[in-house]
Image (spheres, helix red, strand yellow):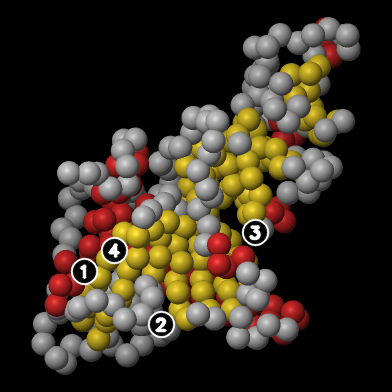
Amino acid sequence: MIPNQWYVILESREIKTGKPVGFTRLGEKMVAWRMPDEKIVVQADLCPHRGAALHQGKINNDNIMCPFHGFEFDSEGTCTLIPANGKKSVPPKIFQAKTYPAQERHGYIFIWWGEAREEYPPLPIFEELENNSFRYADYKESWAVHYSRVIENQLDVFHLPFPHGTTIGRGNRTVADGPIVKMDGEEMQIWVYNRKDENGPAKRAGELGEPTRVPFLHFRFPHLWQNHISEDMRITVYFTPIDENHTMLYSRYYQRFLKLPILGDFVSWLISIFSITILHQDKRVVEKQLPIKSDLKMTEKLIAQDQPIILYRRIRKNLQDGLPIQKKN
């Protein structure tokens, strides 16, 4: 996993005021709850006293109370009460619950997974999609595979005719020219050119000229992908690691060609149903890939059309090593 990044861990609707929720993300057990002022608190789901799961406790005066011995921790993770010592005692500072910097935006809960900082970078988000003109529907599900495999599936530009032969892969467009892959700051952009095998062998990216439309696919590290279907229709997915063997997909289906609230939401939902079918066509293949986790150096034999995956692996390795997205020569 890539440290020192913002990650989506939950949808906003999954957290209620005063009700702790336990879950696993990034290989760590966590607990989250919402304060009366709507602030989101995310902490390690572990009481530093005897290792009890804090999510099994309750919220008491805005603090989370351990279900085992009643220790209480505030929103900063500071222990405010050890009942066995009495209400007027001051708990030792060693009883500190790990707390994650958290933000809520556009219906998602983000945490900073890494070293504390005085200032944090911006959240990975496509700001234009926060425009109220878009209606959208949400869908989430977990896949039993490492998150790198799920991301790479969405960067793969020439698999469509095979797992998706009955949906978006119809037309037998098996030849993949290019693709053109560029980095725009911290965003990977991909232009896809698939066609039938009728006009000679595949062309390299350098033979295609400059793109004349916006990119088809966008990816922002560590885990945000967008399919730019049109100006009025988009799909985004946050691929959040649950642990080394499982990934949570937070998918959202946007449209703005029908803006009326009720009808617009219904159309967004219909789009999501079709997209979920496509997602499951991928899932049956990706969950069986070996090894379960990809890396920069491995035994796979890649071809020219795998350039988006090669670039993803190289940048991911840079970030894991604490290097910039693009090494400078």
Which badge, 3 or 4, comes first in the chain's sequence?
A: 3
Q: Secondary structure at mark 1?
A: helix
Q: Is residue 192 above or below residue 294?
A: below
Amino acid type of the residue that numbered disc 1 sits on in the rendered structure: Gln
Q: Residue at x 76, y 27 (%)?
A: 74
Identify the disc placed on residue 305: 1
Identify the disc placed on residue 106: 3
Image spot of residue 78 (x, y percent): 71, 21
**Which residue is denoted by mark 2 in the rendering?**
168
**Which residue is denoted by mark 4 in the rendering?**
182
Asked if the residue under mark 4 is in contact with the one under mark 3, i.e. CB atoms within 8 Å, the reply is no
Image spot of residue 306 (x, y percent): 23, 64
Q: CA distance from mark 1 to mark 2?
A: 19 Å
Q: CA distance from mark 3 to mark 4?
A: 27 Å
Give the class, few, some or many, for how many residues have Cα within 10 Å of label 1's Cα (few <14, many ≥20).
many
Q: Secondary structure at mark 3?
A: loop
Q: Residue at x 14, y 91 (%)?
A: 199
Amino acid type of the residue that numbered disc 4 sits on in the rendered structure: Lys
Tell us which disc is closer to us: 2 or 3. Answer: 3
Image quarter in which the C terminus is found: top left
Q: CA distance from mark 4 to mark 1?
A: 14 Å
Asked if the residue under mark 1 is in contact with the one under mark 4, i.e. CB atoms within 8 Å, the reply is no
Image spot of residue 16 (x, y percent): 78, 48
Image quarter in which the N terminus is found: top left
Give the class, few, some or many, for how many residues have Cα within 10 Å of label 2's Cα (few <14, many ≥20).
few
Amino acid type of the residue that numbered disc 2 sits on in the rendered structure: Ile
